[in-house]
Amino acid sequence: MRTYHVAVAGATGAVGTEFLRLLETREFPLQSLHLLASERSAGRTVNFHGRNHAIEKLTEHSFEGVDIAFFSAGGSRSKEFAPAAVRAGALVIDNSSAFRMDPQTPLVIPEINPEDIAWHQGIIANPNCSTIILLMALAPLRKLAPVRRVVVSTYQAASGAGAQAMNELIDQTADILRERPPIPQVFPYPIAFNLFSHNTKIDSSGYNEEERKMVQESRKILHDDSLRITPTCIRVPVLRAHSESVNIEFEAGKRPSLDEVRKALARAPGVKLVDDRDNNHFPMPIEASGQDDVLVGRIREDISNPDAIDLFVSGDQILKGAALNGFQIAETWVQQTRSIA
């Protein structure tokens, strides 16, 4: 069995740390590991498989001999260093927004469009976390009947803005409980005991960057430029799992039954059905945190539209929303490469 030389760029961040855990726990065929980060982290050590690995400064020369490079160091670092990794012969799996909408770069959720991996030219993009969590529920239902329109409202955790944002939520919570004023540093407004519109730039249409990502990325992954989708993205005081309220309208007269919907979701890979009406138990971020699967439930008919259904989704933003999806891209690429060989 072939083994691989792997690099993790952004190894000290929340997603990079999760990449390392996945490399340990999912039995990836690893030959060597290179940990890369900014200059201020260089020289630190990280324990991996019982031995300390030194963190190196990320440079253009960091990728000689590397087969797979996981990037989670931000869009600017990806644009600067990913081309050098490709020139060195590495497959780049990039967790930033740098290449997602590049027509030459596949944007992949392995449970949905694994076939797109085959046409990569050195870089495969990991979708935005909110897009992944939405499509894990939507894609299985599009196989039942054509979808006309999707309305989604997100409840996005602090983890989407990184480890410092998670710490800010914890610190502000303690401050408020001690009757001290919360001081925003990572976010523009207090996140503890509060919620606000997603902290990305608003364009002339009134949509923010996160909402535009959901629209554009969903269409690319599903290969459906005509998909009508309107998101509203909100930050909430949750540590690491995103939730979404989703209304799905099917073509007139073709809406699947609720039983068909539940069966489709129950058998969908990477999805866990949590839909217990008797006990009022549905997807919750506290239960989704730490889980590989995306939780889907609260499935019901839209009483205002006979062609639509409503459901609720929760998924771990750091796992399936980021590191796990990227890692699954690598696993799928390895499997596809072996089958060709």
Image (cartoon, helix red, strand yellow):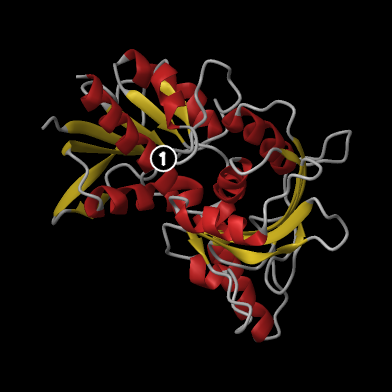
| Residue 246 rendering spot, x and y as whole percentages | 71, 55
Look at 67% across and 71% down and name the residue there: 192
- Location of residue 103 (image quadrant): top right
In front of the other: 60 or 25:
25
Q: Where 177 falls versus 101 (above or below)?
A: below
Left or right: 314 with respect to 311? Answer: left
Q: Quadrant of the N terminus?
A: top left
Label 1 residue SS: helix
Look at 47% across and 51% down and name the residue there: 268
In front of the other: 134 or 40:
134
Q: Where 146 falls versus 182 (above or below)?
A: above
In front of the other: 338 or 236:
338
Q: Where 19 falls versus 170 (above or below)?
A: above
Look at 25% across and 51% down and name the residue there: 26
Residue 317 visible at all: yes
Q: Circle 1 is placed at which residue position?
A: 326
Residue 57 visible at all: no
Left or right: 299 with respect to 207? Answer: left
Q: Amino acid at mark 1?
A: Gly
In front of the other: 202 or 132:
132
Look at 71% across and 36% down and name the residue there: 215
Left or right: 93 with respect to 65? Answer: right
| Residue 178 rendering spot, x and y as whole percentages | 65, 86
